[in-house]
Image: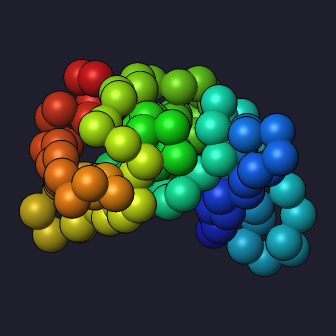
Amino acid sequence: MQTIFVGESNFKEQTGRIAVLDADSGSRRFEFGCDSPITCIACVPELCAVACGERSGQVSLWDIESRAKRWSIPMAGPVTAMSYCLATKRLAAGCKDGSVRIWTLDELSSG
C-alpha cells in the first residue's frame, strides 16, 4: 500500500501531528501526536518509519507498523529542514541556528 505522510500543526495550541494517509483513496489511516508544531518530515523506508522535526527543537522517529515513537532527540533550536538519503542511508536535520545533525541507518535503528 502506498502511503503519504502529512505534517499538521496547531500553532494556537502549540501541538502537531503526522497524518498517515492512503495514497490511493486519500483517507486517513492513523496519526502520530507530537508535543510541538511539526516543521518538517522525512520517510525512512528501510525502517518502515517516519522522522519529524518540531518547532520545539525535537527530532523524533516514529515506527509506522507499531505506531510508537522509537526515539526523540533534542536539537539546538527549531528544526527547519530534514531529509533522508536513500543512497547513503542517512537522515539529516538542520536547525534555525544553522547547526546540522546527521544519523546513519544503524544509529536510527538503535535510537
Query: In which quadrant of the rendered image does the C terminus lie?
Result: top left
Q: Is residue 111 above or below residue 31?
A: above
Count how many numbered circles sit on residues in the image: 0
The quadrant holding residue 82 is bottom left
| Observer-nearest of 52 and 88 | 52
Residue 78 appears left or right of 86: right
Residue 66: horizontal and vertical position, in percent?
60, 27
**Residue located 43% across and 35% down the image:** 58
The quadrant holding residue 94 is bottom left
Residue 12: horizontal and vertical position, in percent?
83, 46
Residue 32 can be seen in this image: no
Residue 23: horizontal and vertical position, in percent?
73, 73
| Observer-nearest of 89 and 93 | 93
**Residue located 15% across and 69% down the image:** 87
Residue 5 can be seen in this image: yes
Q: How was the colour assigned to the protein in this rendering?
A: rainbow
Residue 95 appears left or right of 55: left
The quadrant holding residue 21 is bottom right
Residue 34 appears left or right of 47: right
Q: Is residue 76 above or below residue 42?
A: above
Report the residue that reaches farthest toward the bottom: 24
Q: Is residue 63 above or below residue 51?
A: above
Report the residue that reaches farthest toward the front: 97
Q: Is residue 89 above or below residue 54?
A: below
Query: In which quadrant of the rendered image does the N terminus lie?
Result: bottom right
**Residue located 84% across and 72% down the image:** 26
Residue 11: horizontal and vertical position, in percent?
76, 50
**Residue located 85% across and 56% down the image:** 28
